[in-house]
Image (tube, coloured by chain):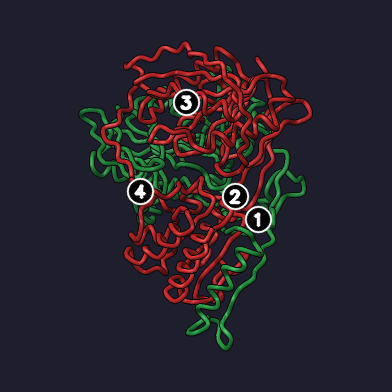
Amino acid sequence: MKILVIISQTQDTEAKIQVSASGDSIDTEGMKWIMNPYDEFAIEEAIQTKEKHGGEVVIVAIGPARVIEIIRQALAMGADSAVHIKGDSFADTDSFATGKLIASEIKKLGEFDVIFTGMKIIDEESGQVGVQVAEELGIPHVSLVSKVIEINPDSKKAICQKEIDGGHVVVEVPLPCLITCPDAMNEPRYASLPGIMKAKKKPLTEVSIDDINFDDLGFSKDAVSKEGARVKTIGIEVPQIERKLKIIKGDDEPMVKGEAVAKSAEELIKLLREDAKVI
Amino acid sequence: MSNDVWVVADLKLDGTIRKVTFEALTEAKKKLVGKLGGQLCAVLLGSGVSGLEGELGKYGAEKVYVVDSELLKDFNTEGYVIALSELIKQNEPAVVIAGNTVFGQDYFPRVAARVGSGVAMDTISIDLSSDNKLQIERFSHSSKAVQKQVFHGGTTMMATVRPNSFKTEEAPATPEVVSGSVELNPGDIHVKVVELQTKESDRPELTEAERVVAGGRGLGSEENFKYIYELADALGAAAGATRAAVDAGYCPYDMQVGQTGKAVSPNLYIAIAISGSIQHIAGMGSSKVIVAINKDPDAPIFQKCDYGIVGDLFDILPPFTEKVKALLSEG
């Protein structure tokens, strides 16, 4: 089987963030860049599929030179080769153009069976690129798959479970298809030391902006820049919500205990009714 | 390109319309329709949906495009993509809005790609710029930041809205019903539903609930989650959980609130035995009032809440729930 995984690099959102001087982006100076956590589940699912059915796992990533860090990580986990659509301008490309660029490179890779990718990226939190790649490739997608029940390379079908509001569904989809991955669908493995050593020798194809035929994509080179975005970010704020911080504590120790319990429950209800007016 | 604003009806498994649809209609009427000078329209896609048009009219829809087909049942993404894309291509609305539900996140970006439009997902405010382009706000960076974005270019502008971000207001209209001329063929549908399991619950859905009671790993077991459900039921609230509680098997995944679960913004969020990790706060930090009950006085949640009790949930919750019940039964 030929299994593809689309991965992205993201700012570590655990970090404290601040707005850049331009006021329309987050300051990336000194920021730690990590693999998008959802993409780790996608890589794990791809490797497990390969372990079951044989074949190869190909990583596809887009972005500046720093993206090589997560490509190496994916190769060290067990992927076989990678394609890096490389260029500084891709850092600002909007989802619409990103989807088209990735799809056009995937078309060059020949036939494949399945594509895995994370359900969304944790900095932009948009979750459209995966689905839009499927559209560009003209293949069906199944998003937010909580469990891949079966991928059958002979009958060319996948059976997946996905959670929906108010229940879950099991769907059957013909291959090739694209599957987006939430967390908790598997336990991503760590890269082993031998894996890290091997990763350095695995094939990596770099595609630069000059290699891309924009006429085929149906938009101009400008569309990959910040200015060319269809949906343009014009401002960003890190709002601080002022909370009231009215905390009821015990008299002699932090915890409310014993006889004070009933009184604290009463007091909280009073606060919710009279101060917050929410019950 | 017309000046119309469309809202795609978001349906529940039981065939009723989700509240987020009425929120979107209300907000679109208030912020977009007058300035653009077109009509407020709803789009109703599904199987056996005829008859729901009046509901949409109640919140101001002047026109309802209906595609009623067996091929659209069970949230069929491909059917939805074909039907909505066709309708957009035929009528070229200025703006199309849908709910940012699990299903909305599934089909809407694909429609945008098919019609060549930009799309903004999970918006919390919608408005128009001075030159009548859609201007939105949305959370990013684990909900720590709010982005303001504006659309460019001449194509239809598309956005999903986060449930519970806007109020609903009735504005009764008698909508003109237009049967959408869309041809759907069984051969177009590749993804087939082989099993559909619905959960019976009288509790409201997490994302649209006015109140949420959520439990963390400190509950200690699946059985102890009854404390969460009891308080939730007393308050008419939805029940939620942290990722740690879900991973520990105390409750199902669809209760997970946080970066990797659902994003909620109710009027009241009660966090029981929840420490308040960044990932959890990302999913509930925009709640209007946050209450924490936790035995660790140093838990980060106590820096992020409005009210709280430092105490053992097993001590505090039984009397608290009793008092809530007594109070709310008085009315």
Residue type, numbered disc 1: Ile
Q: Are marks 2 and 4 in contact (CB under 8 Å)?
A: no
Q: Amino acid at mark 3?
A: Leu
Task: Report the Cα–Cα distance between label 2 and label 3.
Answer: 38 Å
Q: Residue furthest right?
A: B130
* In this view, the mark in front (1 or 3): 3
Label 2, label 4: how far apart the Cα atoms are: 23 Å
Q: Which chain is green?
A: A
Q: Chain of mark 4?
A: A
Report whether B35 appears left or right of B81: right
Distance from disc 1 to disc 4, alpha carbons, whole Å, reads 29 Å
Please tell me whether mark 2 or mark 3 is closer to you in this view: 3
Q: Are marks 2 and 1 in contact (CB under 8 Å)?
A: yes
Residue assigned mark 2: B141
Task: Label 4, secondary structure: give it.
Answer: loop
Residue A60, horizontal then vertical, whole percent: 45, 37
Residue A193, position as x, y percentages in the image = 37, 58
Query: Residue, x 51% and y 52% (percent of image)?
Result: B259
Q: Amino acid at mark 4?
A: Met
Task: For label 1, count other residues whose C-alpha is less than 10 Å away and answer few (under 14), some (14-19) or many (20+).
Answer: some
**Residue B259 placement, left or right of A219:** left
